[in-house]
Image (cartoon, rainbow, N blue to C red):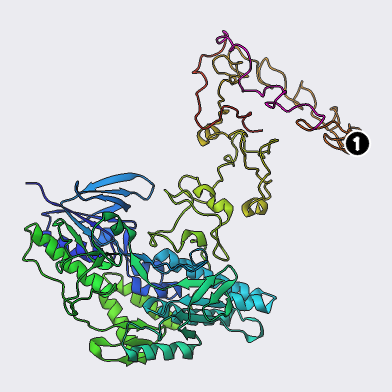
Amino acid sequence: MSRPRILIVGAGFAGFRTARTLSRLTRGRAHITLLNPTDYFLYLPLLPQVAAGILEPRRVTVSLSDSLPDVRLVLGEADRIDLDGRTLHYTGPEGEGGTLAYDRLVLAAGSVNKLLPIPGVAEHAHGFRGLPEALYLRDHVTRQVELAASADDARTCAARCTFVVVGAGYTGTEVAAHGQMFTDAQVRKHPLRRGMRPRWMLLDVAPRVLPEMDGKLSATADRVLRQRGVDVRMGTSVKEATHDGVLLTDGEFVESRTLVWCVGVRPDPLVESLGLPMEKGRLLVDPHLRVPGRPELFACGDVAAVPDLENPGSYTPMTAQHAWRHGKVAAENVAASLGLGGARTPYRHRDLGFVVDLGGAKAAANPLGVALSGVPAGAVTRGYHLAAMPGNRVRVAADWLLDAVLPRQAVQLGLVRSWSVPLDTSSPEVARVPGGPGRQQDASARSGPGAALAADTDGGGTGAGGAGRARPPDEPAKGQPGSGTTQVRPGSGAAQPRAEWETAKGRPATGRPGPGSAELRSEAETAKGRPAAALGGEPARNQAGGEPARNQPGGEPARNQAGGEPARNQPGGEPARNQAGGEPARNQPGGEPARNQAGGEPARNQPGGEPARNQPGGEPAKNQPGGEPAKNQPAPGPPPPGPPSGGHPAPGPVKRTDVTEDSAKGDS
């Protein structure tokens, strides 16, 4: 009898706990597959400490392969689920597609950043749901403090050192608390002008900080934040976000280069495509975490609306504690449905309290309902995190110890760019890369310093693999035919302004071909050094029907080869220009003056010169009405005869689908 197939989507708190519990319950009697975009489980509550430089990024990650040895890991993101066919279609990290079949499916895809219809937020704000976003914020804050320290203008310095955090929940409160300590430590090394200090603002429409927690904990967090210097503004939010700052709902405009969006989360959009009953974006399930009418489908974590049996008529909130407990109950019920475990159990919970880390020795906690603050709360908070982490406990404790006795390292690694972590994304745990599968960027989406340039985002960065700078589609590879300057032909439209990467490296501006202009060579052709094949044009050398290439049998010998014409400046050859015995170069002493120089022939289209081609009074350009047809283009009259003798027979020109019939000659 074949073993049943269990498929788990997502490796967050719920998915990771489900996989680990199922592995223990089934003991090899079932095929367990885990689909996740990354190969690690992220302990999200410690992410603010990564952004503040307390913990190294790998400390808050746990390897899935090491911690789940009996579970098959598949890297990818779910695209579509066929409920009737019991199959799931996914896309791998390199764009390849795949299909997974299942007998039981557990949806634990988690949540993404919650967006609000506020102008400019999607373009200028960044979320805080994944490791790439934490790494970006750490680099960005460090850069702003360093730039502010060297700024000559007091207004610019103040804007760079103003950091706006929207959302006073768990994440936003911890980000603001740790951020203020982080920037204060940096300023001690890079003093600001006139004794200025970094300013962190915490905004929320709620009447108090941590509105979902007990009033005592809320008051403790508010007091610690204000004592530390955080500008806490309740009942206030963002009305509009711009590149230069944010407009608040009270009418004040705050100049800033940093907007951190911690308003909340929403379920992963995957569950919306199933067409099943929903509750505020979450999939409705019964107390056993099974979808009604679908005995093979289970859901847990942030994507599931789980009835709260302790509070009838409500659903469990979207927190890490509930997701972790959901995973255990879901695994037990999946095993029971396959006859591999005991009886089904409903989900019930009992609150053990909450903890909020405020940085240093400060925290707010209420373990078992006992409100704590100060050092005792800090000790309880860190002890809870060490107990809750499924791995890396020793490394995390070691980093905490080092942070207590050594200064933090504030350096910019530059590994994550602004456009790599957009706010509106269904995968906050994965940073976008140039050339990534299906991840084309919008060049107009700028988010302050370090934002995407047109060269970074045009066409999604078509470079395969995405390593290094993405090559624009109209720039051939270096050292390949056609890698010189691309010229703008008459009638092809105006050239685009140079991108920053071109001017920084001294490259000439690249004109984008417009309608009717020639298409550039494909990547396969430029990489192999082949000329572009055109429809019905003049055959290339060494091709059937074409002139044999130099140094080929039946062709003209190449220069400096036996039987060929010696190259210039070689023994027996014609001296090169401006060399001893050779013809002087233009505009050199004794040589012919260059065009448009004193005593020289006027340049085309200049006063007194010959009109340029395709200009009034000039000779029509090739491939224009009344002009000579361009090479490699269909010529009027009968087609050329068959291939002459003496050349190597080769396949004829291949008809390209990426070149228009009226294309002009390849690279000019």
Whole-percent x, y for residue 438 in the image: 42, 49
Asked whether 461 or 576 is in front, the reply is: 461
Q: Quadrant of the C terminus?
A: top right
Element class at badge 1: loop
- Left/right placement of residue 88 relative to residue 206 reads left
Whole-percent x, y for residue 209 in the image: 40, 85
Seen from this angle, which residue lies furthest right?
599
Whole-percent x, y for residue 459 in the image: 52, 47
Asked whether 207 or 386 is in front, the reply is: 207
- Specify whether residue 617 is painted magenta: yes
- Left/right placement of residue 431 relative to residue 498 reads left
Asked whether 528 or 98 is in front, the reply is: 98
Asked whether 561 or 497 is in front, the reply is: 497
Q: Amino acid at mark 1?
A: Pro
Residue at left offset 26%, top offset 51%: 81
The crowd level at tag 1 (other Cα within 10 Å; few <14, some 14-19, many 20+) is few
Q: Number of callouts in the render?
A: 1
Determine the image quadrant of residue 629: top right
* Residue 406 visible here: no
Residue at left offset 20%, top offset 72%: 325
Q: Which residue is mark 1?
A: 589
Seen from this angle, which residue lies furthest top?
645
Residue at left offset 43%, top offset 61%: 424
Determine the image quadrant of residue 37: bottom left
Whole-percent x, y for residue 647 in the image: 56, 12
- Specify whether residue 55 is painted magenta: no
Residue at left offset 58%, top offset 34%: 519
| Magenta residue span | 616-645
Q: Main secondary structure of the magenta part?
A: loop
* Residue 354 visible here: yes
Determine the image quadrant of residue 307: bottom left
